[in-house]
Amino acid sequence: MNKKGKLFSVSEPKDPLALEAPDEPPPACSYLSQDSLPSEEEFRQRYFGSVSRRLWNDWKWQLRYRINSLVGLSRILELLPEESQLLDNIIRLPMAVTPYYLSLFFHQSGHNPLRRCVIPTEQELIPKEGESEDPLREEAQSPLPGIVHRYPDRVLFLATGFCSTYCRYCTRSRMVGKRRLLVGKGQWDKAISYIEAHSKIRDVLISGGDPLTLSDEALQWILHRLRSIRHVEVIRIGTKVPAVLPQRITKGLCNLLKKFHPLYMSLHFTHPQELTPEVEMATSRLADAGIPLGSQTVLLKGINDSVDTLRLLFTRLMALRVRPYYLYQCDPIVGSSHFRTKVEEGIKIMRGLRGFISGYAVPVYVIDAPGGGGKVVVDLGSVVAKRDGKIILKNFKGLLYEYPE
């Protein structure tokens, strides 16, 4: 703490070229009441002293000043009993939250949904039957570090173990944030050589950690190498950055990414409170760069497990040119039971969405099968019976219809 009682005091750099040109202020959000948003300026002035709006909007500054300990967090938030119990415990998954993301809920009650997603509680220390450090058996399907080869025509390329903000329900909590697992060109080169050697691979998903926390130069190196492989037709990037660090989506990054089409981006949104004007600007830039945007959402108990919450999230994402495409049942990682809903609850929610909002806004409900079986679509019970050469169907209102085979 400095003399003025601020958590941090940051001065402008002497060399203005040390940072990218500041982004223009985000536009007014067309569908979100500005009264419902916290005051970013209030948060900046209260906890970061002299930091300017220009620095606040620099993504590297946001990474540098992440809150990455419960002690540091306690200077901003009053810790709940289930959070403060961890002050003297070692947690499996590191804690880190960008100042931007913390500003979205610092003023709200302790049970805010965004807070529950990123702040650890003592419930993480309670293992339950059926949970595993690696429930999807990614390590068993990894022929070499950085590659998971589960499906015949595509691979998962883990380019980094670093995230700007760590989600408490992360399926890769066994590996993310661990210094010994930070990777670089040596490992990337071996992974890309594997992709080059397997001609059936036509689709590469770059994930991690979060690949958009890499520098533009590193991303360009990876994308250039992958795009030079003749049999690689599609490249995808999986990222949470637009939700937790939207400042990273700079004009320069978008100009870089659009050189490597066909390039898709799989985003991760959890709750409508994440959809701020900054996110609107980030998704607009990506969409304007010609990048198809899809969103995958994890169904989380007490956070987004209601029809109203997900209906609002999915329809607002559509307004941002982001199509919801997966609703995931939460993976059974160790200490995740407090996040997991019953599958029957997920089915009820999906029935409350299908037919009541645009089909484009309704994702597919899937379970990533424990043991490495891949994604399995959960049957919503629309096919009721087969008789007399006809299929009996139930529609969104519960009415029955016949389809002739």
Image (cartoon, rainbow, N blue to C red):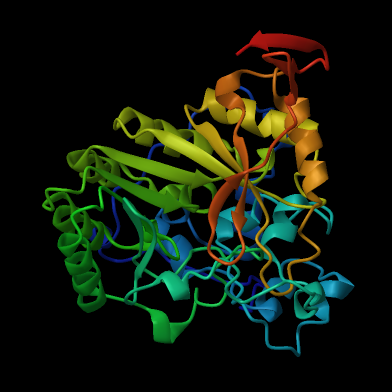
Looking at the image, is 299 positioned above or below residue 282? below
Q: Position of residue 165 (x, y in %)?
A: 55, 63
Judge left or right: residue 66 versus residue 266. right
Q: Split into 4 quadrants, where in the image is the N terminus?
A: bottom right
Location of residue 58 (image quadrant): bottom left
Judge left or right: residue 233 versus residue 312. left
Looking at the image, is 111 positioned above or below residue 142? above
Q: How many marks?
A: 0
Q: Is residue 246 visible?
A: yes
- Which residue is farthest front? 388
- Nearer to the camera, 359 or 202: 202
Residue at x 81% of width, y 63% of height: 338
Judge left or right: residue 239 versus residue 202. right
Q: Split into 4 quadrants, where in the image is the C terminus?
A: top right
Location of residue 388 (image quadrant): top right
- Nearer to the camera, 279 or 290: 290
- Nearer to the camera, 105 or 119: 119
Q: Position of residue 10 (x, y in %)?
A: 48, 68
- Which residue is farthest right? 81
Residue at x 13% of width, y 53% of height: 229
Residue at x 43% of width, y 61% of height: 210
Q: Position of residue 106 (x, y in %)?
A: 72, 56
Q: Position of residue 248 (x, y in %)?
A: 39, 51
Looking at the image, is 306 positioned above or below residue 403? below
Location of residue 49 (image quadrant): bottom right
Judge left or right: residue 271 versus residue 219. right
Q: Is residue 75 visible?
A: no
- Nearer to the camera, 165 or 378: 378
